[in-house]
Image: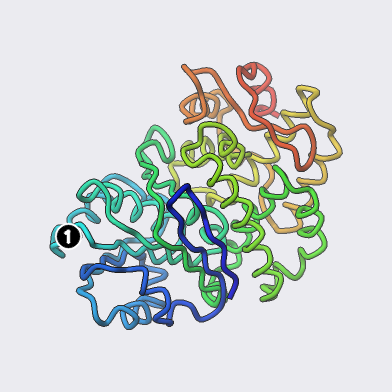
Amino acid sequence: MREIEVELGERRYPIRIGPGLLSGADWSAVLPGRHVLIVSDGNVAPLYLARVERALHDRQVGILVLPAGEQEKNLQRFGEAIDALAALGASRDATVVALGGGVVGDLAGFAAASWMRGVRFVQLPTTLLAMVDSSVGGKTAVDIPAGKNLVGAFHQPSAVIADTDTLSTLPLRELRAGLAEVVKYGAIGDAAFFDWIEAHAGALLARDADAVGEAIERSCRHKAGVVARDETEQGERALLNFGHTFGHAVEAEQGFGGLLHGEAVAVGMVLAARLSTHLQRAPAVDADRLQALLERFGLPVAIPTGLDASSLLFRMKLDKKAVSGRLRLVLWRRLGQAEIVADVPETDVLAILAS
């Protein structure tokens, strides 16, 4: 087992990575109270819910199984999670357990942040994307028609337990979507890690246990360090959103029923890199290299057909990094060196979106 500790001043929590962790009693020790609500979805629950329930045999357990998909990460489903906590009679020492991917983790975490002004929650991510990104750092939210993750809260988990055995049942498309977020860590701040990903691309796609474990650990260490320095995204943490402003706009414009989140981020990273070149801030060769690696992973690298550039720009101006409707984007100087750029001219962004 690989273990990382996220340190937030006097607060800290573990990230544990390895096979067979869902079945162990080890992680249940981070649930001190009697009441536990397990939130999962229709894809994951049939595979893994029973073993989690067995690990919690001595607790009073409630279960909420949601339909799968980004489109379910909404206020209605959030309300169902709150109702489930009420039906359980959950007290202040209750714990919400998120068993699934990023949608389940975000929604369950937001419910935990809101119930009685905040109860504990534990992340049990079952997708690569959730293991390397959404389960770590305490961002919880739901989507509304205006945009992605616009309603939410910062609420740190008590633990993140990433059982890598769950990746054996992950559809290939979901695996590739998770690899987009792995690539992001190399792209924004670790060129040597990007080199490593290029060298191990085949092993990662083949789900080689050592390669996947290494990728998850290095990604989580990067994110844990950033979160420790900037928990509520006042500065450096915004760099983790490389490609996300573009990607979130694509997801919202498609009604959260088109590209997967990781696929939209792949498109967004290429657009951010191309915009950096267009603004003469970065060399084109690095954008080419990024695009080539994403294509090796079978990820999309262009905006889906039928989406209007002006509509995408409108969505981007609703992004949480925007200030008074003016764009602030995460761009880069070169591979491994991202930066936050304020007041990016809309005409230049439109030029990239239209191209």
Q: Residue shown at 84%/32% (left/top)?
A: 283
Q: Residue shown at 47%/47% (left/top)?
A: 9
> Position of 186 compared to 145: left or right?
right
Q: Nearer the viewer, residue 223 or 264?
A: 223
Work out which quarter of the rendered image holds the N terminus and state it.
bottom right
The amino acid type found where label 1 is placed reads Ser
Does 322 appear above or below 264?
A: above
Does 304 appear above or below 317?
A: below
Q: Residue shown at 55%/25% (left/top)?
A: 313
Which type of secondary structure does the marked residue at label 1 adopt?
A: loop
**Can you tell which quarter of the image residue 341 is in?**
top right
User: Residue 11 in the image: x percent, y percent?
Assistant: 43, 52
Q: Tell me the colour scheme of the image.
A: rainbow
Q: Residue furthest front?
A: 10
Does 183 appear above or below 280?
A: below
Does 96 appear above or below 261?
A: below
> Position of 10 compared to 191: left or right?
left
Residue matched to label 1: 91
> Position of 284 compared to 30: left or right?
right
User: Residue 73 in the image: x percent, y percent?
Assistant: 36, 50
**Can you tell which quarter of the image residue 146 is in?**
top left
**Can you tell which quarter of the image residue 157 is in?**
bottom left
> Position of 279 compared to 176: left or right?
right
User: Residue 184 in the image: x percent, y percent?
Assistant: 67, 48
Total number of numbered discs in the rendering: 1
Work out which quarter of the rendered image holds the C terminus and state it.
top right
Q: Nearer the viewer, residue 179 or 295?
A: 179
Q: Residue shown at 68%/67% (left/top)?
A: 214
